[in-house]
Amino acid sequence: MTGSLGALAMAASPAIAHDGETHSYSSTLGQLNGTTGTGTITVDVTGDKAMVNLQVSGLAETFMDGPYPHVQHIHGGALGECPAPADDENGDGILNTTDGAPSYGGILTTLTTSGATGAEEGLNLELGGQGGSYTIQREIDLNAETKASLEAGTAVVVVHGLDPATAGVSEEVFNSPSDLDPSLPLGATSPALCGTLVASQMGDMPAGGADTGVAQETGSNTAMLAIGGGLVLAAAAGGTFMVRRSNTNA
């Protein structure tokens, strides 16, 4: 199924450089919502092209005996920060996507494994990272909004999809109605890793990034999420979102 995904309105952005030089950005991704995984990313921008190298490990491995499909995006148009525990609006123990939107903004680019990278691909599970550890290394076309956000220092990478075994909340909370769509589970729509992309020297290892300061207890809930015939995720974009269902195991 296909759908549409709107992005939050972009704030005023500085003029975009067209000098033909390569400008590099990187981040070490911080953990959210009890995640035990890790991630790093570098984005080398030359003109309207970007070479992306995303390395992720330690996230939820499987869903219904198949690889867990994780989606990830470059967000922007907001503060250029990752959310903190205090941003948990209703105090249920999970930072949902709506809680995070004021900090990191809407989707500007979807970091897919192949094919299109627009916001409309935000929940294309077939093009998401598969399993708990994966690499996305490819050259993509970079839209003006993402490039401007990178230059302004407000571009934030967010990897979605929580592991119910480590989220630190009860099964009832994890599977409660999503803030994006009450037919979806909260845990499946919430961010797992997050980091602000900062200017760096080309070839530098990612360092620093966004330290969220999140320290959460590991939970004991091991229930997996089943929505119809497959996993369904959703991503925040100013109250609008797109959902794709997969009726077969990845």
Image (cartoon, rainbow, N blue to C red):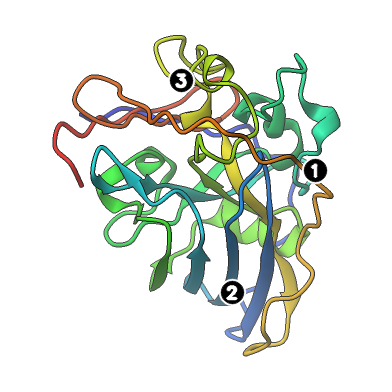
Crowd tier of the residue under label 2, counting other residues whose Cα lies within 10 Å: few below 14, some 14–19, many 20 or above: many
Question: Which residue position holds label 2?
Answer: 42
Using the image, determine if residue 181 lies above or below residue 85. Answer: above
Q: Earlier in the sequence, mark 1 or mark 2?
A: 2
Nearer the camera: disc 3 or disc 2: 3
Quadrant assignment, res 78: top right
Q: Is residue 198 left or right of residue 181?
A: right
Q: Earlier in the sequence, mark 3 or mark 2?
A: 2
Q: Mark 3: which amino acid?
A: Pro
Q: Nearer the viewer, residue 34 or 129?
A: 34
In the current view of this chain or complex, which residue is farthest to the left? 248
Using the image, determine if residue 30 lies above or below residue 204. Answer: above
Question: Which residue position holds label 1?
Answer: 79
In the current view of this chain or complex, which residue is farthest to the front? 220
Q: CA distance from mark 3 to mark 1?
A: 27 Å
Crowd tier of the residue under label 1, counting other residues whose Cα lies within 10 Å: few below 14, some 14–19, many 20 or above: some
Q: Nearer the viewer, residue 224 or 120?
A: 224
- Residue pictured at 58% horizontal, 55% vertical: 146
- Residue pictured at 57% horizontal, 34% vertical: 220
Question: Which residue position holds label 3?
Answer: 185
